[in-house]
Amino acid sequence: MKQKLEVVEILCRVNFMKTKIKNKISKYKNYSSLVNFISKKNIFQKKSINKIILSKNKNYFQDAESITKRILKVSRLINKKINLEKIAKIYLWYTDLLKKEELYFEKKRNYRHKSYKKVFEQVYNRPTYMFNYAIGLGVSQLFWENHLKVFQFYQKNLVKKVKKNSLIAEIGMGHGLFTAEIFKKHSKTDSLMFDVSDMCLNFAKKMSVVSGANVKNIKTSKVDIQKKVPIADGSLDILLLGEIIEHLAKGKKVMKTLSKKMKKNGLCYFSTPANGPAEDHILLFTKVNQIRNFIKECSWKIIKESPITLKGMSIDFAEKNSKVINYCAILQRK
Ligand SMILES: C[S@@+](CC[C@H](N)C(=O)[O-])C[C@H]1O[C@@H](n2cnc3c(N)ncnc32)[C@H](O)[C@@H]1O
């Protein structure tokens, strides 16, 4: 009898949670369909997404609906056959890919690739692969606690400080949500976009346009930033360097060159992980101080920073146990 009562109690609690989650998201049509498709296909993702949903408020859901809608819109402009169910599948493919790299990193304490050329051939030079990469990474902005915190840091410390008529540049846009966030505020900003992948240039440009930008204000350039930095010295008000430096074999050279491209009071948003494996990461940082020293050695000063860990872990614990730390900062040239 007692056991039966316990089972009934658990079932009631589960139903209560289900209703609570449904009530929280049902208004946000695209977001809730995406959540449902992912949850049906993968129980682990379902659990972690439910946790996020229970902890968030209206602002998160409004942003999440807008991001989901825009990812769907841009994806359909590139491939008409895409729908939210396919986006869910692509996201799960992307999380599997990262899981594989995490297992490799746990064993070897090193990233899989050392050669940029190899990564270029296996990843950046494959348009369909990069289409899925842009979608997978874009969707991670909705559901990964660390990516959500990084985006909040970016909105608060960079987007809010961008002035009208600024010249902005982003290197390595992926899905393009970061530059697009500035266009949502200042539709007439001038933007330069640089990426080694045609697909990401196309995806990011469209992302800015569906977010309010005028296509005339966007210049895209396919370039390996390690070979060429086609930006005039002292010209940039804003530079976005989110999750790019760890992809490069010549990161130091690129960072040094880029500091010369900034105006005196220009702001640079910078993010990179320590212990953050991915199939296309080459430059491994294992400690926050290594990242700080790297920045300073490349002629930049740190104005504000936030090293973000998972589940409230201390930096010290994360460093000792090779757990990911998402470091983000606002920089100015020295
Ligand atoms: C992880 S994504 C970054 C997305 C976004 N900026 C963010 O903060 O999440 C890395 C991007 O860097 C681009 N990339 C990689 N190597 C590059 C290089 N040598 N020159 C220019 N872009 C590069 C990739 O094509 C991809 O779009």
Image (spheres, rainbow, N blue to C red):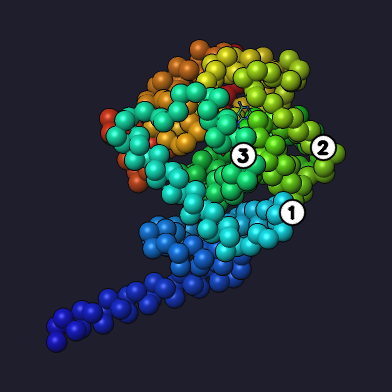
Compared with residue 187, is residue 122 higher up or lower down, i.e. above or below?
above
**Residue that sits furthest to the bottom in the current view:** 1
Q: Is residue 83 left or right of residue 26?
A: right
Q: CA distance from mark 1 to mark 2?
A: 20 Å
Q: Is residue 155 above or below residue 77?
A: above
106 with respect to 205 (left or right)? left
Q: Which residue is mark 3?
A: 126
Amino acid type indicated by mark 3: Arg
Decide: few, some or many residues near mark 1? Use Cα within 10 Å; few <14, some 14-19, many ≥20. few
Q: Nearer the viewer, residue 266 or 253?
A: 253
Name which of mark 3 and mark 1 comes first in the sequence.
1
Residue to which mark 2 is pinned: 217
Question: In which quadrant of the rendered view does residue 69 lie?
Answer: bottom right
- x and y, in percent, of residue 119 in the image: 53, 30
Residue at the image point whose x is 63% and y is 46% from the top: 128
Residue lying at 55% horizontally and 71% vertically, measured from the top left: 26
Mark 2: which amino acid?
Answer: Asn
Element under disc 3: loop
x, y percent for residue 86: 58, 60
Considering the numbered disc 2 on the image, is that residue within a helix, a strand or a loop? helix
Task: Give whichever of 81, 7 is nearer the camera.
Answer: 81
Residue 77: numbered disc: 1
Residue at left offset 78%, top offset 45%: 213
